[in-house]
Image (spheres, rainbow, N blue to C red):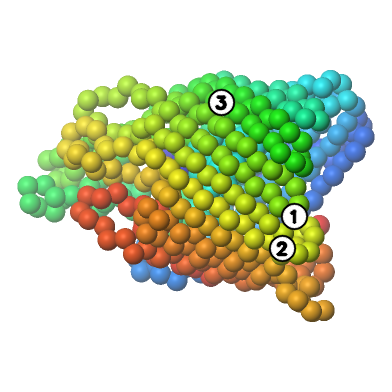
Amino acid sequence: MICYSRCGVKQKPVTVLIKSLLLVVLSGFPLGYSWAAAETASTGNVSMETVGYLGQAHADRESIFSSMRANWEGSTWGRLFDTHAQANLMLTLNHTAYSFADLPDAYLATSAALSPVQVALGRKTESWNKLDQFWSLGIWEPRFRWDYLAPQEVGLMGTFATLDQHWFRLTAFGSPIFIPERGVPVEFKDGVFTSLSPWFLNLPSQGNLLGTPTPIRYQLVSPSVMDIVSHFGLGFLFRVGEKTGPWGSVGYTYKPINQLLIGYDGKYDLSTTTIKANLYPRVLYHELTSLEVGYGGTPVEGWISMLKEQPIRDQTLPSLRTQEIQDSLALASMLGIDLWGKGASATRVELGSLLQWGGDAPDLGPDSQPGVNTFESRYPFQNAGVVSVKTPLFGRLGRHWTVLGKMLYDFGNLGTILETEVKYSPNPKWMMTLGLEVLGSTRELQAGATMDFISRYRANDRVHGGISYVF
């Protein structure tokens, strides 16, 4: 089974162990590269966390997840090569199916001392588009969506060539392979998809056939792994301006869409008196164009970003009902202000906005209805604003406490996400956290209407707490 944004694979403990050992080997590579390295740097942390979902009413949903996490990041800068790797590991203590290991960044690059042009090979994150990063859309770079409220950004896989000067930076990207973004772990058994995750909504278990409720059994008709990954991509990003002061950038890419789209068909099986539904993952290409201007520095920074997406329709059988997307244009802005204090101890306010047109389109194929889209939107917010505040508490003891608050309101879909978190750090090594996320929607859905992100997951209010150690 291919793992993508709406489907995952239940991982066996042995698989998780093998992946964990692989992470250890890969993470040790930069540190073992000292024979040619002039400088090394690494940081990491381990933590214990418990997350409790407050609104889970379904028997097939788990409401409490306790986990142990480890995150590590390391770099080397040598005479011949530079390396960088970032590794994440989560072991869910009460649900092994929800454990994972991931490498958001892992690449080998030629040294900056050899040439002004650095060539890197591997998985590498880049600041391709501020809009895509700030709103965690996964349009330009893929995500690991194990948590839909806090998806992990991961890099594109391929070859990168970068010319970085004081006042401009040019990055070119090319790759013969494609790795779709991953989602929550899902188990397929006896024609039914299930998941412990609250972020997976079960597919309908029965349909209406001639007025009679009839069970539905699914089958994933997945292409081979090579058929999925054998898709090329290319792109570039040109940025002018230094880290502080005014800057601008323009970017373009032609590559596969990070999310696999779906087509499906169904027929009645007389032998089992069930509806057999076949799901067909599809790889589509798109063109992305980015244009941005901004100002970097303290105590004020900000930017305005435009992202245009032009999907390229694939060829599908006329018997399939297919998920459709259309051209999209998105505009976003962000203004960040340090009201007082400096660096990590500053009281900071950020204001952001998003306007988005297009993107989703009505389904096509047999039994599709005009104007109806039955699939999850690739743009979770339509027209939205967000405000966030981070501040340390005052007083001698207050310097060990940090309070974070965030409110997002989707004007187009009448939905709200409230997030708050309190951090206590008695010293630089230890930190304790306690947080709350609440989703609310006043939108009244009509029959056949597409559910937006907040309406779809409005039951996923949750609290979380944990303790972490930095090494």
Please state if 356 lies on the left or on the right of 192 as rendered: right
Q: Give residue 365's position: percent from left, percent from top.
A: 21, 32
Residue 260: which quarter of the image? Answer: top left
Q: Give residue 130's position: percent from left, percent from top.
A: 60, 41
Q: According to the image, label 1 marks what residue? A: 299
Q: Do the residues labelled 2 and 1 touch (CB within 8 Å)?
A: yes
Above-or-below relation of 157 to 201: above
Element under disc 3: strand
Looking at the figure, which quarter contains the N terminus?
top left
| Residue at mark 3 to residue at mark 1: CA–CA distance | 31 Å
Q: Going from the N terminus, do you reach mark 3 or mark 1 first? A: 3
Element under disc 1: loop
Q: Going from the N terminus, do you reach mark 2 or mark 1 first? A: 1
| Residue at mark 2 to residue at mark 1: CA–CA distance | 7 Å
Q: According to the image, label 3 marks what residue? A: 252
Element under disc 2: strand
Q: According to the image, label 2 marks what residue? A: 339
What residue appears at the point 45 percent right and 59 percent down from the top-left corner?
409
Q: Can residue 278 be seen by looking at this rendering?
A: no
What residue appears at the point 36 percent right and 55 percent down from the top-left corner?
413
What residue appears at the point 91 percent right and 30 percent down from the top-left corner?
36
Above-or-below relation of 68 to 310: below
